[in-house]
Amino acid sequence: MAGMVPPGTAVLGEASAAASAKNINEVGKKVDYMNLPCPIPYEELHREALMSLKPEFFEGMRFDFTKGLNQKFSLSHSVFMGPMELPSQSAETIKIPTAHYEFGANFIDPKLMLFGRVLTDGRLNARVKCDLTEDLTLKANAQLTNEPHMSHAMFNFDYKGKDYRTQLQLGNGALFGASYIQSVTPHLSLGGEVFWAGQHRKSGLGYAVRYETDKMVATGQVASTGMVALSYVQKVSEKVSLATDFMYNYMSRDVTASVGYDYILRQARLRGKIDSNGCAAAFLEERLNMGLNFILSAELDHKKKDYKFGFGLTVG
């Protein structure tokens, strides 16, 4: 009688063995280092937090109109009227009224994108993105102005590997930079960067880590220039995200922390934040009709007694 096995014991043992085998297979899949995902570019490490915490706030009135001529080519017109801030030694913000018109031309193709903007104050902005190969992309940005020594240009060569990305930067003023980011697990990426500004005789190193799942994104970045940047985004649902960031400069001892939200409605998107300096901001984009969007922007800086409000329309 002592050697008899109770009924059901063999079935329980087989179920336990099957569960253990399933767990082993799942662990094996998670550590498949030969099939890791490609990480995002190094320059976009904080993109989820930036989208929630730093939309394009503005003050005054803005109107944007885009007219498509065909499937690839379009023209844009933008009018802006509002104050412009001037640098000041005092704590008070100095603003002067300003207005300008901007004309733009866009060419969008699967392998080539061209963007050009001309402003009434004489500035010319141009951007180019060209896929040289399936994995190598050229990006170029340029700004030409009438002011001496204020024009600049930047060229980026981005290479996308199977589980890594690397970038080489070349700019005027003897600016050279390089970055590399590598996936080490399905959710964790590590990267680094180096730059040299020959005109100012300055160099720097930087390191970054990013952890990402379906529900959250955590990013940390540190550089020899004194910058420490941390961000965290939690996806509460398909429509709601919460974000926070922490910026610290151990050279100047400046520190700023902020917390914000991103709420996507059926025909609107609302983003807002509040930071440790007492500045609260909100940005609303509402679709009134197909191709017609209404924009509201507000920033309240109680410490500096600086209050900014803006509204605009986007057509096309």
Image (cartoon, rainbow, N blue to C red):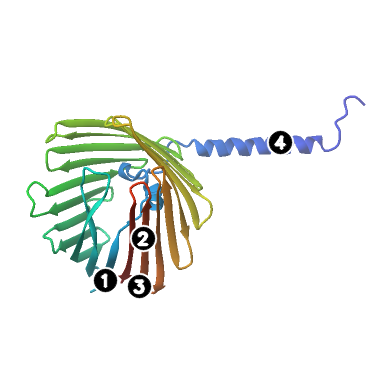
Q: Badge 3 local density, few (<14 within 10 Å), some, or many (20+)? A: few
Between discs 2 and 4, the one toward the N terminus: 4
Q: Nearer the viewer, residue 78 or 67?
A: 78
User: Residue 65 has which mark?
Assistant: 1
Q: Viewed as shown, does residue 4 lie left or right of 63?
A: right
Q: CA distance from mark 4 to mark 3?
A: 58 Å
Amino acid tagged 1: Phe
Q: Is residue 259 visible?
A: yes
Residue 115 position, x and y percent, is 20, 60
User: Residue 16 has which mark?
Assistant: 4
Q: Badge 1 local density, few (<14 within 10 Å), some, or many (20+)? A: some
Q: CA distance from mark 2 to mark 4?
A: 58 Å
Residue furthest out toward the right: 1
Dot 1: what SS? strand
Between discs 2 and 3, the one toward the N terminus: 3
Kindly report which numbered mark, 2 or 3, lies closer to the viewer in this rendering: 2
Kindly report which numbered mark, 2 or 4, lies closer to the viewer in this rendering: 2
Kindly report which numbered mark, 2 or 1, lies closer to the viewer in this rendering: 2
Residue tagged 2: 297
User: Residue 253 has which mark?
Assistant: none
Amino acid tagged 3: Gly
Q: Is residue 35 visible?
A: no
Residue tagged 3: 291
Residue 122 position, x and y percent, is 11, 60
Dot 3: what SS? loop
Q: Viewed as shown, does residue 112 lie left or right of 273?
A: left
Screen quadrant of the C terminus: bottom left
Q: CA distance from mark 2 to mark 1?
A: 19 Å
Q: Badge 2 local density, few (<14 within 10 Å), some, or many (20+)? A: many
Q: CA distance from mark 1 to mark 4?
A: 64 Å
Between discs 1 and 3, the one toward the N terminus: 1
Dot 4: what SS? helix
